[in-house]
Amino acid sequence: MAGSARYTAVLDANVLFPRLLRDLLLSLAHADLYSAKWTTHIRDEWTRSLHASRPLMIEQIKSAADAMESAIPDCLVMGYEHLIDGLTLPDPNDRHVLAAAIAGHADAIVTWNEKDFPRASLDLFGIALQTPDEFVLNQIMLHEFPALSAIKKMRSRWERPACSARTLIELLEVRGLPQTAAHLRDLVDLI
């Protein structure tokens, strides 16, 4: 698989599970601010967790996963499996994420699980670790107007219920993106 000319990030299952964060990350990727990557293993992990918490939404979850893969061209990393056994991480079940990042020529892994991806292990491959808050804020700081436009478009797609810019900022803060929320408060009229 060839690398991307854009900054490339592998999105861990735990950042794709929450709807708001998934929509935000994919909106920024769809705006071509970075190249979003994941694997069928990562997709299966977050959809399985969502099925467990919302068993009556099986079709909606499958539809959301299919829509993600249609909206983000070349999102699936393939051919990473042979790397898994040679990797060492505190949780062996996370090796597939690092293997995908290596095979997908990723610059970063975006995850909430910082302890499971020690910087020393990632540094060997030139891969950074970023929390979703760090990653989203970095995208906004690097590509301010395209990022704000993508966030505004995302918010305008929400119909049930509609969401004001101020409410979105509050939701981001409550859901673990305090730095992003603080930055967006100064730009509320642009989103």
Image (spheres, rainbow, N blue to C red):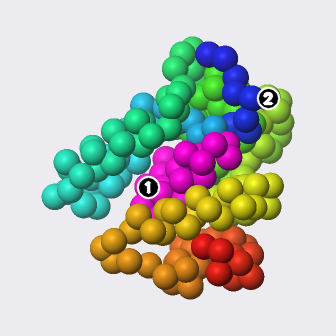
> Crowdedness of circle 2 by 10 Å Cα count: few (<14), some, many (20+)?
some
Q: Residue at x 27, y 55 (%)?
A: 52
Q: Residue at x 35, y 52 (%)?
A: 49
Among numbered discs 1 and 2, the one appearing first in the sequence: 1
Give percent across and percent down for residue 66.
Answer: 33, 39
Q: Residue at x 71, y 78 (%)?
A: 187
- Residue corresponding to mark 1: 17
Question: Which secondary structure, mark 1?
Answer: loop
Q: Determine whether, in the image, residue 102 is placed left or right of residue 65.
A: right
Relative to 135, is 173 above or below? below
Relative to 31, is 151 above or below? below
- Residue corresponding to mark 2: 125
Quarter residue 67 falls in = top left
Can residue 116 be seen in the rendering of this structure?
A: no
Report the disc number at residue 75.
Answer: none
23 drawn magenta = yes
Residue interval drawn in magenta: 10-34
Location of the N terminus (image quadrant): top right
82 drawn magenta = no
Q: How far apart are the two marked residues, 1 and 2, measured between alpha carbons?
A: 26 Å
Question: Which secondary structure, mark 2?
Answer: loop
Q: Residue at x 53, y 27 (%)?
A: 74
Query: Which of the two marks, 1 or 2, is nearer to us in this view?
Result: 1
Can residue 125 be seen in the rendering of this structure?
A: yes
